[in-house]
Amino acid sequence: MFKKSLTVLAVLGAFAGTAMAADVTVYGVVDAGLAYTHDKTTVNAKINAQELKDSVKNDEFRMDSGNNSATRFGIRGTEDLGNGLQVGFILENGFDADTGALTTDDTIFDRQATLSLSGNFGTVYMGRMSTLISDTGSVGFYGSMASAFGSGWSSNIAGHTAVNATYQTRYNNAVTYVSPEFAGTKIYAQYAMGDDEENTIRNDRYAALGAEWKAGPMDFGVLVDWLDKDSSEHGAGFGARMNVQDQYTVNFAGSYDFGVAKAFAAVQYFKDARDAGGILDNMGFFEIGNAGDQVFNKANTAAEGYGLHLGATFDALGGTFLAGVGYMDGELDYAYDGHVADIKAYSASLGYEYALSSRTKLYSGVGYLKQEADGVKTGVASGNWKYEGYDVIAGLVHTF
């Protein structure tokens, strides 16, 4: 990591001659590699009284970026204010190593843009940041103990996220509090006000409360999060009859380090989630509810169920192997028509990392993901849907 220690002498109005000590770090990660994906989607259904039995296969070989670690570039800094107080900032950009393009269009610091204040009371962060349930950024603490793969590598090497309610990785206009560690325990609290018309019913508003407890080789976490869904599109007529409920999840995860191996376990219960494991997005050709209005449909469809994930890392052949298996069981309901489908997901992943130095490593991985929606019943469609996908990846990661 390239680091600069700067002493800044500032003369600002009445504060002329005051010296302020600041520490600024430039850092980043570059991840580039190759990936092969094979997937198959199968439909056995009736849509508008017409039989539909079909399967679509896809094979793709490509250069990819960020399969193991998100490619990024960032600047962070701190200043000691005295009396035990410290101010800090992080500005972090995500980009694709294979094209140089921004990960998020029209957003320079899409991964994190925060200002923080730390002291004996803990740390308060403000700005754009990761959610507590992720494993990214300054405050995402849950994902790293839930799965050996964290929040996932590629689409079909997805770790626990393949069998959990789909969540947004980052929010704008967010405030997060992280407590000091006491008896191995930290408390986390987060609230995000949404975009544009902040803190109104016209925005998704997100809140989370969690705790992490560490004792020797054990790391245990619990987290509850809640999404107050944007209800602006539920106006007169059809939308006014919707019974739209806010989303919440309850999560428990833990890991235990045996030295040469480390075990992971996670369980989640989700209620009224917009999606689970990405199933609703993938089965989009089933015209649920208001045909043709995907924004409306997504906002009024909810998933309820549970997900389980087990994983491990172990040292062998000079590197580290990663493994994980997951299972999800639930149902999709439409706020107007009621029950839509029974859903299930199965995942299995295996990865390997080999360090070439303290800052550079090789990686490879294979993954399998299966998703099912059975007994689909909507106003215009009924039947079954299935997705199966495989990923094979390999690449190189360098940090600086």
Image (cartoon, rainbow, N blue to C red):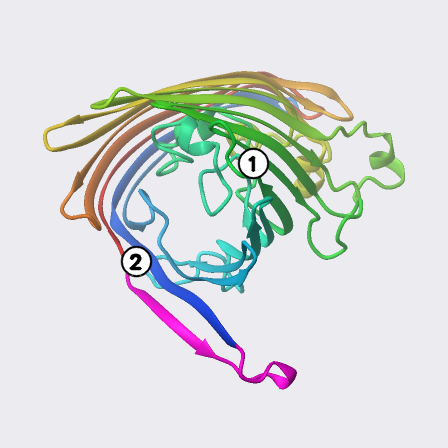
Counting from the top left corner in percent of width and height, residue 215 is at 40, 23
Which residue corresponds to the image point at 54% horizontal and 78% vertical from the top-left? 18
Within 10 Å of disc 2 (Cα), the crowding (few <14, some 14-19, many 20+) is some
Identify which residue, 218 or 272, lies in the foreground: 218
The amino acid marked with disc number 1 is Tyr
13 lies above or below 4: below
* Quarter of image, res 263: top left
Tell me the residue that label 1 is attached to: 167
Identify which residue, 129 or 215, lies in the foreground: 215
Counting from the top left corner in percent of width and height, residue 248 is at 66, 27
Tell me the residue that label 2 is attached to: 98
User: From mark 1 to mark 2, how far is it between C-alphas?
Assistant: 26 Å
Q: What stretch is highlighted in magenta?
A: 1-18
The amino acid marked with disc number 2 is Asp
- The secondary element bearing badge 2 is classed as loop
Which residue corresponds to the image point at 48% horizontal and 47% vertical from the top-left? 138
* Quadrant where the image shows the N terminus: bottom left
Within 10 Å of disc 1 (Cα), the crowding (few <14, some 14-19, many 20+) is some
Residue 6 lies in the magenta stretch: yes
**Is 268 left or right of 218, judged from the image as shown?**
right
Which residue corresponds to the image point at 73% horizontal and 47% vertical from the top-left? 203
Residue 101 lies in the magenta stretch: no
77 lies above or below 251: below
* Quarter of image, res 346: top left
**Is 22 left or right of 317, judged from the image as shown?**
right
Taking the view exactly as shown, the residue that stands out farthest to the right is: 236
Which residue corresponds to the image point at 78% horizontal and 26% vertical from the top-left? 336
* Quadrant where the image shows the C terminus: bottom left
**Is 34 left or right of 373, judged from the image as shown?**
left
**Is 108 left or right of 95, judged from the image as shown?**
right
